[in-house]
Image (cartoon, grey):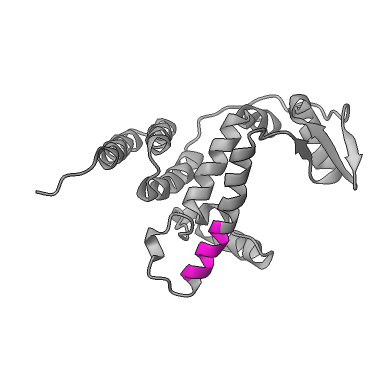
Amino acid sequence: MLKLGKGRRRSREAIATATELQAAGDHLRALEVLTEANRERHDPELERILVRVRNRAFANLPADARPIPEPDGSQMELRDGLPNVTADRLSAGRLRHAISEHGAMVVRGLVPDQARLGELRSGVDRAFDARERAGAGSERGDDDPWYRQFEPEPEYELAVGFGRQFVNAGSGVWLADSPRMLFELTEAFEAAGLRDLIGDYLGERP
């Protein structure tokens, strides 16, 4: 009899629990369960499912209206035409000012862990390489955690199609098409405390 390893068994249990939670309409909790399991052990199947669950969770986010902060241009330095701010001075107000006035912001020290920065840089390269392999008909295909083209819910197909074309034309990789990189980047965002800050900027949970 074939036996599943401990890590694989944990993944199966997480997928089963997440499926039940989604059926009950609790998409955010399903997202948490899958994320916790993937933190313990990277699993390409979990990461692919996480992309779909994020898409469904977005469509079912509960109401979370927040007051939009006033733009705040203080304690920022312009370098090469872009506002720069250190991570300890990052705020929703400063982000709003930077985006509305300059279209971007450079945040210094947002990810202080140099090892993690190196992993993120390497992950970008691996996502591009995986897409090239997929385009060349690599045998890894659907098993490659660094690139698998996302198939959204029907109501998002048109928007994702246009978005992917736009990103690809700009020599980028659509983040949802790289399950592993999407997981790693969202983990980095969580560690940096960006969920609440982005929520304050948008006026609702991202």
Q: Quadrant of residue 6?
A: top left
Picture quarter with the C terminus: top right
Q: Quadrant of residue 144?
A: bottom left
The image shows residue 129, relative to residue 27, as above or below, that is: below
The answer to which of 105 and 127 lies nearer the viewer is 127
The answer to which of 8 and 195 lies nearer the viewer is 8
| Rendering coords of residue 115 (x, y %) | 60, 39
Which residue corresponds to the image point at 48% horizontal and 49% vertical from the top-left?
180
Magenta stretch in the rendered image = 126-134
Which residue corresponds to the image point at 36% horizontal and 50% vertical from the top-left?
45
| Rendering coords of residue 61 (x, y %) | 50, 34
Which residue corresponds to the image point at 58% horizontal and 27% vertical from the top-left?
64
| Rendering coords of residue 99 (x, y %) | 79, 41
Q: Is residue 177 magenta?
A: no
Please, which residue is most extreme toward the bottom here? 136
Tally of marks: 0
Which residue corresponds to the image point at 43% horizontal and 35% vertical from the top-left?
39
The image shows residue 95, relative to residue 153, as above or below, that is: above
The answer to whether residue 178 of the structure is visible from this angle is: yes
The image shows residue 94, relative to residue 124, as above or below, that is: above
Query: For the stretch drawn in magenta, what is the main secondary structure?
Result: helix
Please, which residue is most extreme toward the front here? 115
| Rendering coords of residue 159 (x, y %) | 57, 57
Q: Would you say 95 lies left or right of 43 here?
A: right
